[in-house]
Amino acid sequence: MQDVEKLISESETIIKKVIYKLKIYRDFDEYMQIGRIALWQALQKYDATKGDFAMFAYMTVKYAVIRALSKANHITEHELAVEEDVIIVNSQQQDLITTGLEWPEWFEELNKDEQFLLIALFEKELSLKEIADKYKLSYETIKKRRQRLLSKLRGLLL
């Protein structure tokens, strides 16, 4: 066990070199740990007859970090964004809710957030960016809410 700890502490530069070459600046500690685990695995799999340990360790660490990056990207691309934030109707938004238009009966089937978004988009003619900036929400959040609203409206009107 002492040998593994000594090897890992001596080989920290290999791990750092891999991380810097791959231009990883976020989650540095996480990738350092992935590199340490890969280094330990390299020590377990190393065969002295096949070459230098330093190169074997470098390649093992590099591919472990690349796999972790790929997995992180795959998860990020395919994860479903769950929104827990709710637009709370406050005094600023009250002027958007109280509208001068006569809305059809299906308007009442929408919740307050959906009504607010519908009024902001179509009566007040605000852009998604303007809504996001004004109410301190992300552009993507407003965009997804608009998509869900339009889907719900299609369902109500068909």
Image (spheres, helix red, strand yellow):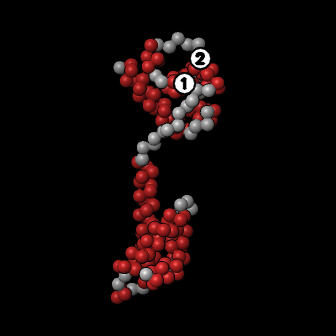
The residue indicated by pointer 1 is 116
How would you rate the neighbour count of disc 2 (Cα within 10 Å): few for under 14, some for 14-19, many for 20 or more? few
> Within the image, what quadrant is residue 48 found in?
bottom left
Residue with the most extreme top position: 102
Corner quadrant of residue 20 = bottom right
Label placed on residue 36? none
Binning the other alpha carbons within 10 Å of mark 1 as few (below 14), some (14 to 19) or many (20 upward) gives many
Q: Position of residue 111 (x, y in %)?
A: 48, 24
* Gap between marks 1 and 2 measured at Cα: 9 Å
- In the image, 37 versus 139, the foreground residue is 37
Q: Is mark 1 on a helix, strand or loop?
A: helix
Q: Do we see residue 10 in this rendering?
A: yes
- Decide if residue 117 is on the left or right side of residue 68: right
Name the residue that disc number 2 marks. Answer: 98
Q: What amino acid is found at the position of numbered circle 1 in the picture?
A: Phe
Residue 58 higher or lower than 67, as above or below: below
Location of residue 49 by image quarter? bottom left
Q: Which residue is at a point 55% across and 38% down the rendered structure image?
A: 139
| Residue in the image at 52% along x and 27% along y | 113
Query: Is residue 27 or residue 17 the one in the foreground?
Result: 27
Q: Position of residue 135 (x, y in %)?
A: 61, 33
Above or below, comparing residue 153 to residue 141 in the picture = above
Kind of residue at badge 2? Thr
Q: In this view, does 112 lie above or below 28?
A: above
Specify the quadrant that holds the C terminus.
top left
Label located before the other in sequence (1 or 2): 2
Farthest-out residue, front: 1
- Disc 2 secondary structure class: loop
Position of residue 130 relative to residue 156, above or below, is below
Quarter of the rendering occupied by the N terminus: bottom left
Which residue is found at the position 50% from the left and 63% from the top? 30
Q: Residue at x 59, y 31 (%)?
A: 131
